Image (tube, rainbow, N blue to C red):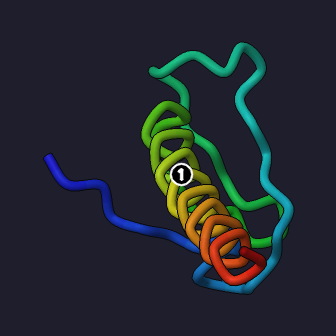
Amino acid sequence: MTTQKTSPNCPECGSPWKRLPPSREGQYHVYCEECGHDFGRYDRLQAQFRSLLDDVESHLKHKDGASDNNAS
């Protein structure tokens, strides 16, 4: 299964605000606070953002390693 990348902002209205489910369990959906857009289940949304975070962290580590090599 491939994880589709998503922006943290709502694709409908661009709002960064989300209404998270009360218990944040996998069976509940996350909605945009402004327009009510359904982002899908919380666990799926969490996996998408975890994937984005992993990409950013690996990019930063790569840049950090490249700057260390240039300093020597």
What residue do we see at 14% from left, 46% from top?
Answer: 1
Give the number of marks.
1
Which one is in front, 20 or 5?
5
Check disc 1: other Cα within 10 Å, few if <14, some if 14-19, many if 20+.
few
Percent coordinates x, y for residue 49 in the rendering: 57, 52
What residue do we see at 42% from left, 68% from top?
Answer: 5
**Relative to 33, does residue 22 appear above or below in the rendering?**
above
| Residue 17: quarter of image | bottom right
**Relative to 66, does residue 13 appear above or below in the rendering?**
below
Q: Amino acid at mark 1?
A: Asp
Percent coordinates x, y for residue 45 in the rendering: 52, 46
What residue do we see at 46% from left, 41% from top?
Answer: 47
Residue sitting farthest toward the left: 1
Q: Which residue is mark 1?
A: 54
From the viewer's perspective, tell me whether residue 49 is left or right of residue 51.
right
From the viewer's perspective, tell me whether residue 39 is left or right of residue 4.
right
Percent coordinates x, y for residue 53 in the rendering: 61, 54
**Relative to 36, does residue 18 appear above or below in the rendering?**
above
The C terminus, quarter of image: bottom right
What residue do we see at 48% from left, 21% from top?
Answer: 26
Which one is in front, 65 or 24?
65
Which one is in front, 44 or 64?
64
* Residue at disc 1, secondary structure: helix
